[in-house]
Amino acid sequence: MKINYLLLLTGILGLLTNACQKKEEVTKPIERASFDLIQERILTPTCATAGCHASEQESSFSQHGLVLAAGKSYDYLINKDPKNQNALDDKLKRVLPYFSLQSLFYHKLNWDPNFHHSGKSYGSPMPFNGKSPYKGQIEFVRRWIEAGAPRTGNVADSTLLDDKTPGFL
């Protein structure tokens, strides 16, 4: 009888030891690149639309020279000179990595005329649909630029994109 208890106890200890040694597999949610989120949540639905910044074939392309469609927008934005003369005079880039205040994209999204334009016009605020971006969207873009405006990598808190506080009324 002692042997049966001993075998049973050994078996239980063996199972417990195995269970403790097995590492629990943790599945992390796939983090989306911050720029991909900007493309999906801001650029594609509000900027890369017919009549605006959808392609080089848009009638307004010669005026702004900017395409914000998926697969093209990043190359049109980063370290590129804008066509707006006031922005050029102020040495802004469309997006200057690490410097949101020197990035025309950030200025165009922020509709508050008292914010940082020093009374200068950088053209119409965007998007051109008459509805200001949400504060969370503007802050997400600012943080992405301040983090170097990378094409890949998650550098801004994506929960900001859920903030529906009006950016400017």
Image (tube, rainbow, N blue to C red):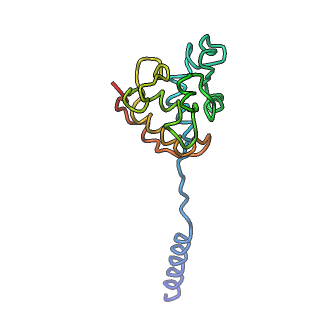
Vertical side of 32 occupied by 49: above or below: above
Front residue of this view, candidates 135 and 106: 106
Vertical side of 44 occupied by 12: above or below: below
Question: Who's the residue at 33% across and 24% down the image?
Answer: 169
Question: Who's the residue at 40% across and 24% down the image?
Answer: 132
Question: Who's the residue at 40% across and 30% down the image?
Answer: 134
Q: Position of residue 16 (x, y in %)?
A: 51, 74
- Farthest residue to the top: give it: 59
Q: Specify the quadrant of the image occupied by residue 120.
A: top left
Vertical side of 139 occupied by 62: above or below: above
Vertical side of 26 occupied by 99: above or below: above
Front residue of this view, candidates 96 and 147: 96
Q: Is residue 128 left or right of residue 71?
A: left
Q: Is residue 103 left or right of residue 114?
A: right
Q: Position of residue 56 (x, y in %)?
A: 66, 17
Badge count: 0
Q: Position of residue 64 (x, y in %)?
A: 59, 19
- Farthest residue to the front: give it: 89
Q: Specify the quadrant of the image occupied by residue 83.
A: top right
